[in-house]
Image (cartoon, rainbow, N blue to C red):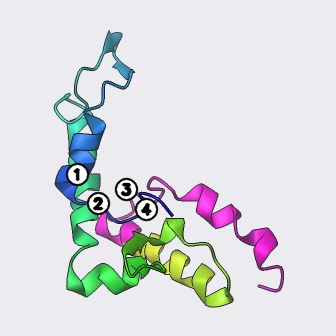
Amino acid sequence: MNNARIRTCAEYLEGLRDDQEIWTRGARVKDVTAEAGIRGGTASLAGFLDRQHEEAYRDKVTFLDKNGVHCATSHMVPKFKEDILQRGHTFYEWATWSNGIFGRTPGYKTPQLWPAPMCPDF
């Protein structure tokens, strides 16, 4: 899997500075990491990415790929019931970090629906 490793806060914020076409209040946003009304959300989410690297959380919210690289559980291809449960625990953990405000962080919905055909006995 390419580019699935967990990123740091700095890597995430730099990745947002890619000249995407984002508009708010009738004007194009030059930098979402600096724009009033958006920068707080980007900073909060970026902080969550750093938290994934902390020893206390790393094993709760990431998995090791076949190369031994820590990856976000939303990139995990579930093979067992436990894999689906781990992803659910990850989404719960992220929601607690934001007191429920970021209950649906990026990568939430698709990974929840995607494994259903692969684990019909769950």
Q: Are marks 4 and 2 in contact (CB under 8 Å)?
A: no
Q: Are marks 1 and 4 in contact (CB under 8 Å)?
A: no
Q: Which residue is mark 1?
A: 11
Q: Quadrant of residue 46?
A: bottom left
Q: Quadrant of residue 84?
A: bottom right
Q: Nearer the viewer, residue 117 or 1?
A: 1
Q: CA distance from mark 3 to mark 4?
A: 25 Å
Q: Which residue is mark 4?
A: 4
Q: CA distance from mark 3 to mark 1?
A: 23 Å
N-terminal of the two: label 3 or label 4? Answer: 4
Q: Is residue 105 left or right of residue 49?
A: right
Q: CA distance from mark 2 to mark 3?
A: 21 Å
Q: Are marks 1 and 2 in contact (CB under 8 Å)?
A: yes
The magenta segment: 94-122
Which of pointers 3 and 1 indicates the residue nearer the eye?
A: 1
Residue at 59% in and 83% down: 83
Q: Amino acid at mark 3?
A: Ile
Describe the element under mark 3 as helix, strand or loop: loop
Q: Is residue 86 magenta?
A: no
